[in-house]
Amino acid sequence: MLPALFVLAFAAAAARAMPISKPHELVVWRPEITYPTQAVEWVVGTTVNVTWDTSDMPPDVTNMEGAILLGHPDERSEHLNTTHPLAGGFSLADGIVYFEVPEVEERWDYVVALLGDSGNISPTFRIFSTYDDAQVDAQIDPEADTAYEE
Ligand SMILES: *[C@@H]1O[C@H](CO)[C@@H](O)[C@H](O)[C@H]1NC(C)=O
Ligand SMILES: *[C@@H]1O[C@H](CO)[C@@H](O)[C@H](O)[C@H]1NC(C)=O
């Protein structure tokens, strides 16, 4: 629905006489994060990526510069680490950004937020300190996961 609407809006705008000089409008766009997905496992020190869907990007997004923040939501807050973004200074139009996983504590409930023109949050995923931890986890019954929470 939305992508079709944006395409129509764009086509309508393009059909009007050029150049288009509209008053400044705040265009809100919430790109869907497509990676990491639920239960992805990242390891500290490795290069990973975050990807998002750019197919519904409006033509006049007002702030194209993106940032990726790491968080771990609870009922009070998303606890996004705004002082140390995982990545920044890239364009939201890129659809992907690569970075190295910093040394953070192991958690099973991390999310990444994509900020720029607007924000969007990934499903929860895991960060391990080493590959060994990740491999050990692969052998654990998923039913046992809750034992690691708090
Ligand atoms: C992003 O990372 C995932 C997991 O490592 C990988 O499967 C995927 O190919 C990567 N995407 C790109 C475009 O490199
Ligand atoms: C934010 O990330 C940095 C670097 O990983 C870390 O040192 C700092 O403790 C984090 N701050 C919060 C509030 O989590």
Image (cartoon, rainbow, N blue to C red):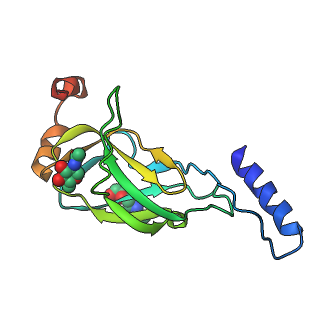
Number of dots carrying numbers: 0
- In the picture as drawn, the residue positioned furthest to the bottom comes out as 19
Is 129 drawn above or below residue 92 in the view shown?
A: above
* Residue name at image x 49 percent, y 48 percent: 119
Quarter-wise, where is residue 121 in the image?
top left
* Residue name at image x 62 percent, y 57 percent: 55
Q: Where is the N terminus found, in terms of image quarters?
A: top right
Quarter-wise, where is residue 145 in the image?
top left
Say whether residue 145 is left or right of residue 86: left
Q: Is residue 41 visible?
A: yes
Q: Where is the C terminus found, in terms of image quarters?
A: top left
Quarter-wise, where is residue 27 in the image?
bottom right
Whole-percent x, y for residue 139 in the image: 16, 36
Q: Is residue 43 visible?
A: no
Whole-percent x, y for residue 124 in the image: 35, 38
* Residue name at image x 12 percent, y 41 percent: 136
Whole-percent x, y for residue 144 in the image: 19, 24
Say whether residue 126 is left or right of residue 52: left
Q: Which is more toward the observer, 5 or 21? A: 21
Is 144 drawn above or below residue 49 in the view shown?
A: above
Say whether residue 137 is left or right of residue 113: left
Q: Which is more toward the observer, 59 or 83? A: 83
* Residue name at image x 24 percent, y 28 percent: 142
